[in-house]
Every structure is written in C-alpha cells, then in structure tokens.
Amino acid sequence: MVSKDDFKKALDLIKNSNNILITTHTRPDGDACASVLAMQDVLTGRGKSVTTLFLSEIPDWYRFLFDESPPILAKDITLEQLKQTHPDLIIILDTNSYSQLPQLDQYLRQSESPVLVIDHHLTADGLGDVELIDTTAAAAGLIVCDFLKYAGWKISPEIAHALFVAVATDTGWFQFANTDTRVFLACAELIDAGADPIEIYHHLYQNFSIQRFRLMLAMLNTLELHLDGRYAVQHLTLGHFKQTGAAFKDTENLIDECRRIGTIQAAAFFVEHKDGQIRCSLRSTGRIDVRKIAQKFGGGGHKMAAGTFLPGPLENAKKLIYQEIEQQFQTTENNAEQQP
C-alpha cells in the first residue's frame, strides 16, 4: 500500500502546479487509458490546465471514454512542440519504465519538470520525484482511487466509470488471480458513484470490428501446444494484418482466447512488426513467472502477465521464449520432487 506520506507529497506536487502533462505507456490498455482520463477529469475540475498525451493509438474499444481523441506523440504533436509546452508537473500512469515510453524517454531525461509516477508494476526505473507505487494493487486505477479518497476529491460518475474500466480490464473482467477483496470493494464504491458495468461490458467485450474478429480467427488458426499441452503459442504476421484489414492495436487481449483450454499453464503470443521486431505477450496461471522471462529480454510486467520485444525472425523469437518456458517448467518440477 502507498503511505500517507507519499500521498501527501503527491498532493503537494499537484497543488503547486498549474500546467500538468499526463501520459502513460505505449500500446495503452484499459488501465492506462482510463487512469489517464480519470486524472485528467479530476485535475481539470480542480482548475488545472491539463494536457494528455498518448504515445500510440488508443484501441477503438476504449474511445468511448473520451469525448475527443487525445493527441498522440509524433502524430499530433512533435517532440520539439512538446518541449515548448513547459509543464510544471508531469504525471506518468501505469508504468515506471523508460522502455515503455519510446521517444518521450528522451524528453523526460532532459526535462527539469517534477514527475509524479502512479504505478503497480514491479519493473521500475525510478522515473518519479514522487512515486505512488503499490505492487499489490490489481490496477493503477486502484491507486488513483486511493489517492482521490486521500485528497478528499469527489469521484464524479464520469471518473467512476473510467476507474471501473481500469480495474475491470486489468483483472480480465474479474477472472485473473489479482482479483481480490480490494478489487470488489473498490468496484462497489465506483458503482455507487455512478459507474455502469453493463454499459462498460458492452463497450469492452461486445464491440469488435469485423476486422478484429477476422484477426482473432487468423490467430487461432496458428495455435500450437507444447510441453504436454501446458504451453500454448500463437502468432500473427504482417500478412495477417494485410489480409484482415486489422491494425496492431486490434491484438490487445487476444492472447487470452487460448487460455480457455484447460491444460494450458502458460501462453505466448507473437506479433510481427514492420521494423522486423517481434512483440511477445506472455500469460501464466501462476506456475510460470513470465515477468522474469520478459525482463531477461528488456521487457517487464507481472508474474502472470508480461511482455517484451524480441529480434526477428518469428521462429527465432519463438525459440527464445520456448527455452525459457521449458526451463521454468523443469525447475518447478525439480523443486516439487525435492519437497518432503
């Protein structure tokens, strides 16, 4: 849990700032998008001048959160233009790693503006002058909730709606092992404050484009099972995107489809990018620590959900991850055999 002292430092930073920049990691997920919106709304309501900045496109199924599409670095605003905005506070949500902030990392290293980080990941580069870090929190949105309650700031229906999205998506709609009492208590409070779970579920899970649906079908056709059905591998190539008309943002959460198979304890999803790199998403039911694997290759995340980039070609990336997964299975089996 975050200490009251750290909450006070964060509150003091905000109170002493007028021009605030809010951002999050590249390839923003529901927790990132919703936490950004919640902080934007609450700080605007406190009379602050707030600029939100994303580092890549927002997936279509999160656009319902925003009245207007927020600017994207390199598309709507250049790094040079950003430097001219001179924020007196930068708030970074749902990450504490330079590797998750491409291009913006250069700006952060040169900027003299104070930085507030709100994050729940173990992987950390210490980007903040003040950091609200709680690795036990299922979502960054939960830490935002706690901060708003500490500050005594009212959670409007719009903010409650956003924070419910943050918590619901980072728990896989309350399916993942990080779904605890704290999650349900917070969501109950958010519903009382105006969040509408039925509407949110429709936007998130019943709102696929036909292109994304076809991309999912293409991915499912690549399914491979290894290690006695315990390890699932799926992939998408540039050709799949061309054939389906889908975009890279349409890949979010597709990795979870294969986890409906009862034997699977770990899964990897490889996506070929135009620069030749392979994006690898990793999931685990708990026996395999995928964060350790992702960190070995410069990525990060959680024990049961992590990701990284690997050098191509695709088969090379698959081989690298297979070796790590196999080794962890062997290690856990050997440890089990040694137990009295």
Image: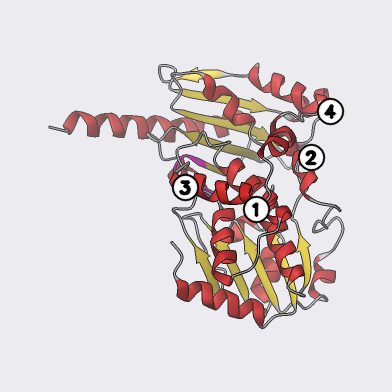
| Sequence-first tag of 4 and 1 | 1
Whole-angstrom CA distance, mark 2 to mark 3, is 32 Å
| Sequence-first tag of 1 and 3 | 1
Give the amino acid type for the residue marked by disc 1 in the picture: Ala
Circle 2 is placed at which residue position?
60
Give the amino acid type for the residue marked by disc 3 in the picture: Lys
Whole-angstrom CA distance, mark 2 to mark 4, is 14 Å
Residue count near mark 4 (Cα–Cα under 10 Å), binned few <14, some 14–19, many ≥20? few
Circle 4 is placed at which residue position?
245
Task: Tell me which residue sits at (57%, 51%) in the image.
Answer: 189
Q: Is residue 288 magenta?
A: no
Q: Looking at the rendering, in which quadrant would you find the N terminus? A: bottom left
| Sequence-first tag of 3 and 4 | 4
Q: In this view, does 32 lie above or below 265?
A: below
Q: Which colour scheme is used?
A: secondary structure
Instruction: Tell which of 73 and 91 is nearer to you.
Output: 91
Task: Tell me which residue sits at (79%, 44%) in the image.
Answer: 64
Whole-angstrom CA distance, mark 1 to mark 3, is 42 Å
Instruction: Tell which of 119 and 330 is nearer to you.
Output: 119
